[in-house]
Image: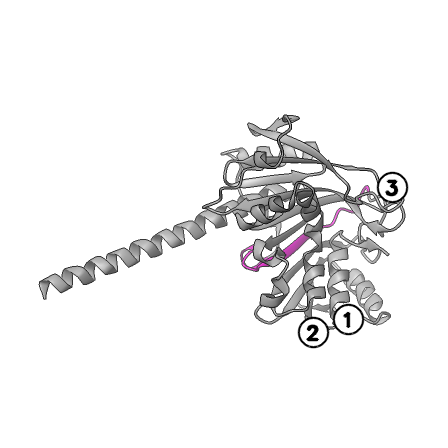
Amino acid sequence: MRHLSLIYAALIALAALLSGCHRNQESSQGTLELRASSALVGGYETIFYSKSQLLAPNAATFMHISEAEASNLRYPFAYLQGALDNLGSSAHSSMFANSVSVLVGAKDFLPPAGLGSVRSQRCYIVVLGRRSTFDLRKYITSAPVASAAGAPVLSWGAKLGEYGEDDPKTSTLYASQLGQSYVLISNDLQGLEKIAERLGSVNEGVQSTSEIPDWGALSQHDEWAYRKYRHAGIINADAAGMTDVTSSADALVFYFNSDKRTGVFQLIASDKSTAEHINARSTSSKMAWPPLKQIGARKWEATIPFSGDEASAERIFVVVGLFGFPIYL
């Protein structure tokens, strides 16, 4: 009996150890994601976050939504996919197989020349998994063009249609890998260098995420977005997704609730003018957008069902556009 007791005790201790390791691993990944979010806040107007699995080609199946809905949800990351595909198909698959999540910061929204996606300065942060073996130098063998936080910055050109159908020039991309923690990819070298510096600094805190409303709850979702409105220096309100936005609007929040197959859209503002404009546009269109309703002193909210039809996909398309990712069709 004493022998069995010792075995049981050993098994219990082992289970506790493994459970502790699992919690530590989750905590470590959570810290990397928190630092990535913090690095983007303040430097970019919009931040979009997604678990890597939601960006996979078959994501619609396990998300239990239509392919059109899934495609529109991952649209803010389409530029990254195009950039990676230009390096070879294995670059895209390898990076996402070795990552847990991806964030993008975007700002300075401009219309395309002719039809196409709205342009912006973007910086993607790919958060690598704890067992990642990804090596950026395997796919980009040219000499570094700069250094960021002590890591080489690599560059390549790609035909991504970034400037619109009437301006088919090549996009210039920059990338840097910070150990086995992050891969940064951007169309702006200075922006990438600043983010790398913030991620690589041991003194860089995570307090900046405190400006995001209900950050603790928001960060638990598999996909979320936050936009802090900038009201000065807007070159084109339509391209910036600000046609219906008044000066009283402070921020936008969106998250995908996978359990309920809904998206929750929130507006933070000091008065109801922007909510009224958005509701009026919804009423005049075929989207049947649920109206934004006031739920607090400075907050309006709408819950958007993912119903699998064309109207549902259109609603998601519009939401993504309000964060600075519209398309001129």
- Judging by the rendered image, the residue that carries numbered circle 1 is 311
- Judging by the rendered image, the residue that carries numbered circle 3 is 167
Amino acid found under the numbered disc labelled 2: Ser
Residue 272 in view of the camera: yes
Q: What stretch is highlighted in magenta?
A: 214-233
Vertical position of residue 55 compared to residue 303: above or below: above
Determine whether label 2 and label 1 are within 8 Å by CB.
Answer: yes
Vertical position of residue 276 compared to residue 178: above or below: below
Q: Is residue 189 left or right of residue 25?
A: right
Q: Is residue 222 magenta?
A: yes
Q: Distance between the Cα atoms at labels 3 and 1?
A: 31 Å
Residue at 36% x, 51% y: name it: 21
Chain-order first, disc 3 or disc 1: 3
Depth check, front residue: 94 or 192: 94
Q: Is residue 226 magenta?
A: yes
**Mark 2 crowdedness (10 Å alpha carbons): few <14, some 14-19, many ≥20:** some
Residue at 53% x, 41% y: name it: 134
- Judging by the rendered image, the residue that carries numbered circle 2 is 307
Closer to the observer: label 3 or label 1? 3
Q: Where is residue 200 in the image (x, y as percent from the top left)?
A: 53, 34
Depth check, front residue: 268 or 218: 218
Image quarter of residue 316? bottom right
Residue at 79% x, 37% y: name it: 170
Q: Where is residue 265 in the image (x, y as percent from the top left)?
A: 68, 63
Vertical position of residue 217 compared to residue 99: above or below: below
User: Which numbered disc covers residue 29?
Assistant: none
Which quarter of the rendering shows the N terminus? bottom left
Which quarter of the rendering shows the C terminus? bottom right
Chain-order first, disc 3 or disc 2: 3
Describe the element under mark 3 as helix, strand or loop: loop
Q: Distance between the Cα atoms at labels 3 and 2?
A: 37 Å
